[in-house]
Amino acid sequence: MDGKQMSMQATIEQKLAGEIAVDYLQVENESHMHNVAPGAESHFKVTIVSNVFDEQMLIKRHRMVNGILQQELQQIHALALHTLTPQEWEARGGLVADSPGCRGGGKNQ
């Protein structure tokens, strides 16, 4: 390693892909949508599609992801999770809801 620290987004991607057999994984840094300093890594949206979620209630899916990202959750402000089975992902046409606008002094207010 050359001494450069991995971005939070890359860390989240690497940890999830390393722990869960994913069919699809997208980690979006949505910090720019909030009233934070330029370059901040504080708000993320994760879409993860995996057979590991089959027959699991939503809370159990989220607990699994939160457990994997336990260390990172101490450093970020918000994490929106979309945890889907391949069948759920297909039924949605490969789409998830947009994150809501910032309610705590957003840039677009």
Image (tube, rainbow, N blue to C red):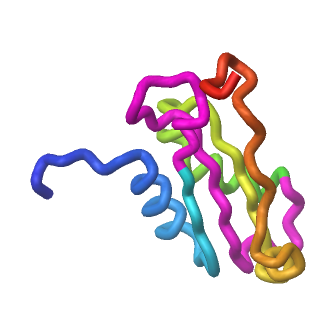
**Seen in the image, is 100 located left or right of residue 39?**
right
Q: Of all residues shown, which one is farthest toward the top?
A: 105
For the point 63% across and 80% down, which residue is it? Answer: 23
**Outermost residue, left side:** 2
Q: Where residue 85 appears, x then y in whole percent? A: 79, 75
Note whether 14 is above or below 106 in the view shown. Answer: below
Q: Residue at x 43, y 33 (%)?
A: 40
- The answer to whether residue 54 is left or right of residue 65 is right
User: Seen in the image, is 3 located left or right of residue 58?
Assistant: left
Dividing the image into 4 quarters, which one contains the C terminus?
A: top right
Q: Residue shown at 80%/75% (left/top)?
A: 89
74 falls in the magenta region: no
Front in this rendered view, residue 109 or 35: 109
- Let me know if residue 52 is in the magenta part: yes
Q: Residue at x 48, y 31 (%)?
A: 75
In the figure, 55 relative to 6: above or below? below
The quadrant of the rendering that contains the N terminus is bottom left
The front one of 77 and 36 is 36
Is 97 on the left or on the right of 73, as rendered? right
* Vertical comparison of 43 with 90: above or below: above
Q: Position of residue 25 (x, y in %)?
A: 59, 69
Q: Position of residue 83 (x, y in %)?
A: 75, 62
Residue 10 sits in which quadrant?
bottom left
Magenta residues span 29-58
